């Protein structure tokens, strides 16, 4: 059993099915509480990304072209779901520097933020307004 009160240099190892597992110290005090607080906010923030993403996409797609645009969105979503972790892992393994690896994710975040910043929702709604009658089950 690991010694959770050990000094940082003292890390106890144990084995589980012939695999070595290292148990570092658990954070104490405010740091331990902060981990849970940050986890809750990340869960709320990231948990809302998926439904908002689909709602925004559906709102911007011209009527009658839903399958084409949602297929492209799904395909690009699959690509961008594995590309940042792949780049992170590649750089981390090549340099053994997680700080350098995290920089590889930054362009994805910046580009996405810029797209959302410059997106004019009112103009987009106006541009697709005359196509909404083509949507199945929508009376305009």
Image: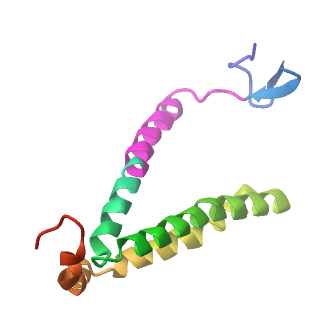
Q: If the image is split into quadrants, where does the C terminus sit?
A: bottom left
In the image, residue 82 above or below residue 27: below
Residue 112 belongs to magenta span: no
The answer to whether 22 appears left or right of 111 in the picture is: right
Q: If the image is split into quadrants, where does the N terminus sit?
A: top right
Residue at 47% across, 69% down? 71
The magenta stretch spans which residues?
A: 24-46
Residue in the foreground of this view, choosing between 39 and 135: 135
Callout count: 0
Residue 122 visible (yes or no): no
Magenta-colored segment: predominant secondary structure: helix
Residue at 49% across, 64% down? 74
Direction right: furthest residue: 18
Residue 79 image-quadrant placement? bottom right
Residue 105 visible (yes or no): yes
Residue 125 image-quadrant placement? bottom left
In the image, residue 17 above or below residue 69: above
The answer to whether 84 appears left or right of 46 in the picture is: right
The answer to whether 68 appears left or right of 63 in the picture is: right
Q: Residue 87 location in percent, x, y?
A: 71, 64
Residue 41 image-quadrant placement? top left
Residue at 63% across, 27% down? 26
Q: Residue 113 location in percent, x, y?
A: 43, 72
Q: Residue 75 location in percent, x, y?
A: 54, 67
Residue in the foreground of this view, choosing between 101 and 9: 101
Residue at 85% across, 27% down? 20
In the image, residue 8 above or below residue 60: above
Residue 39 belongs to magenta span: yes
Residue in the foreground of this view, choosing between 137 and 6: 137
Residue in the foreground of this view, choosing between 139 and 123: 139
Direction top: furthest residue: 1
Q: Residue 95 location in percent, x, y?
A: 83, 62
């Amino acid at each position: 059993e690991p010694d959770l009160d050990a000094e940082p240099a003292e890390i106890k190892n144990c084995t589980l099915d012939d695999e070595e597992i290292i148990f570092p110290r658990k954070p104490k005090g405010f740091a331990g509480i902060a981990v849970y607080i940050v986890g809750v906010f990340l869960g709320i923030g990231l948990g809302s990304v998926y439904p908002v993403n689909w709602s925004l996409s559906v709102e911007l797609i011209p009527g009658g072209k839903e399958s084409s645009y949602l297929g492209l969105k799904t395909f690009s979503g699959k690509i961008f779901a594995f590309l940042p972790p792949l780049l992170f892992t590649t750089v981390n393994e090549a340099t053994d520097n997680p700080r350098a690896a995290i920089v590889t994710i930054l362009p994805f975040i910046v580009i996405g933020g810029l797209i959302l910043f410059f997106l004019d929702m009112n103009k987009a709604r106006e541009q697709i307004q005359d196509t909404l009658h083509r949507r199945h089950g929508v009376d305009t």
